Image (spheres, grey):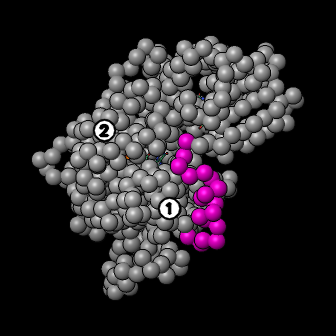
Amino acid sequence: YQTIRFVLGDQLTRDVSSLADANPDTDLIVMAEPQAEATYVPHHRQKIVLILSALRHFAKALRDEGFVVDYYDYKTRPTKSFTDALRTTIDQHDVSKVIITEPGEWRVRQEIENWSSLPDVKLEIRPDDRFFAPLLEFEEFAKGRKELRMEYFYRGLRRNTGILMEPDGKPVGGQWNFDHDNRKTLPDDLTPHPPKSFAPDPVTRDLLDLAYDDFPDGLGSVESFGWAVTRQDALMALDHFIDHRLACFGDYQDAMTVKSATVYHSLISPYINIGLLLPDEVCRAAERAYHDGKAPLNAVEGFIRQILGWREYVRGLYWFMGPDYVTRNHFEAKRALPAFFWDGDVSLNCLKQAIGETLENAYAHHIQRLMVIGNFSLLTGLSVQEVCEWYLAVYIDAFEWVELPNTLGMALYADGGTMASKPYAASGKYIDRMSDYCQGCPFNPRKNIGSDACPFNALYWHFLDRHADVLGNNARLRMPYQNWARMKDADKESLIAQANAFLNKLDSNETGLHSRQR
Ligand code: FAD
Ligand code: DLZ
Ligand code: SF4
């Protein structure tokens, strides 16, 4: 062979740049299931199974095309790292040229950049062009700006791609953003059409059977595994979403309910992130649904903005901020992660639902991640590093380039406002408005003080009070700070005492937090 093409577990598409000019006669493909990748965080077992099954299916598709794939199966041909796999292949096949598409994490990028110092290796790292915006475009956008806001980057990409644009350069529907239409709560008589689920095939079945024994440090259960593991099935999942769920996606985008863990969300993030679907085809399919009258504009624009806007923006931000972004901790939040993050055993019903569903399905939708678990972590000052590691471990779609800006920047405001214009801090009243969680909770979202008061309420004021020096001048927080200033001293003191009592319980994993002790 003349060339090695190294394909990573989130690059599983024939359209990845490393395979653009691949030739079965001269090129050897390498794919691996290294121990280091399965263990750098205690991944949810469904995430491990998804990635390994998709890797194996993609290797088979390449073999069917005539390629030879030098495959490192974790059981039959174990390898410690991507580098060890590469070394073994080079030794066995005597090839020096290596082509790879840039990875999705600083950690792996640094590992791969070191390959150029291996003896006899000629390394070519190609840009990952599965995104709408090359990294340079984000740099141009970001240079000289103190605050980076998604909306302007998104509008630029709408213009560049022509997605949801009129020929005269105006946005379809006359406005860029339909967010104000997308905050409805789910009516009692509406039950979302369930998402598409796939029965595991033998390749997936084998992995599921071994998931507990072979990944003892992994998290969560595999019983609900119904993810697509091939491009063909991922396309079916996309079609199903567009036909049955997209029309309501906008209206109920921020709604949370015990009736459905997925509401009207698409569940396609893992497929786009690992390469089974391309963001461009997903956005174009949604745009087509609008033109065909299958879904209203607030749903289609809202959905496209998540991919063309947020997804591109967080990816640009991740690489722009550099490898030290992970160490940012604006509020110096240090509290240890409570035990219930690992078992969902907590009496606050919103957390019980969101964490419980996460551990069961490796999935929670955006508002659960941001306004329940993220908000709680922000208000209680949980360690930024521990929270980020938890998010990187538990979600089926978690890769650092997308997990970190969302968790550290958006949910925890640990970058001091680079990513978000204000912290996403909210009291129990927000959760009560957007969900039916409070109805089954031992706490009362309308009470601030007392043993049955919703803990989020006092924690919210405690958070604003303890960070008044850095947040007090934030224009978007003027209202809550004015309300706080107007409160009587005695009321303020009771709220602070109420919050402190909760934080003390949290630190000692005490009564009232754990369901079984209630
Ligand atoms: P939908 O609601 O149907 O959205 C459609 C698509 O838009 C998603 O599939 C995804 O590709 C994209 N998208 C939506 N929101 C975002 C966003 N904020 N950033 C980037 N892409 C977005 N997303 C990940 O892919 N991986 C992560 O590790 C991840 N961690 C997150 C951590 C926190 C604290 C928060 C608040 C959000 C995180 N997100 C992450 C973003 C978002 O929550 C998920 O993309 C979404 O919930 C995936 O489910 P879905 O496919 O049903 O999304
Ligand atoms: C997350 C993950 C896991 C669990 N397993 C593998 C694997 O076996 N092989 C692989 O190539 N990639 C895996 N990944 C993804 C990597 O950890 C990492 O996120 C990507 O390589 C970054 O591009
Ligand atoms: Fe969550 Fe408070 Fe509502 Fe209980 S009352 S579900 S703790 S917001």
Disc 1: residue Cβ within 8 A of ligand 1's nearest atom: no
* Secondary structure of the residue carrying numbered label 1: helix
Q: Mark 1 = which residue?
A: 156
Q: Where residue 504 appears, x then y in whole percent? A: 44, 60
Question: Which numbered tag is attached to residue 143?
Answer: none
Disc 2: residue Cβ within 8 A of ligand 1's nearest atom: yes
* Secondary structure of the residue carrying numbered label 2: helix
Task: Find the residue positioned furthest to the right.
Answer: 119
| Residue 301 falls left or right of residue 56 | left
| Residue 430 falls left or right of residue 270 | left
Nearest the eye: 414 or 488: 414
Nearest the eye: 150 or 360: 150
Q: Where 113 falls versus 73 (above or below)?
A: below
Q: Where residue 424 appears, x then y in whole percent? A: 42, 64
Task: Find the residue positioned furthest to the left.
Answer: 189
Q: Where 38 falls versus 471 (above or below)?
A: above
Q: Which residues are magenta?
A: 130-147
Can I make out residue 56 in this image? no
**Callout 1 amino acid:** Gly
| Residue 10 falls left or right of residue 227 | right
Residue sitting at x 15%, y 46%: 190
**Callout 2 amino acid:** Phe
**C-alpha distance separating marks 2 and 1:** 27 Å
Q: Mark 2 = which residue?
A: 241
Structural crowding at the residue carrying mark 1, measured as other residues with C-alpha within 10 Å and reported as few (<14), some (14–19) or many (≥20): some
The disc, 2 or 1, on the residue closer to the chain's N-terminal end is 1
- Dividing the picture into quarters, in which one does residue 27 lie? top right
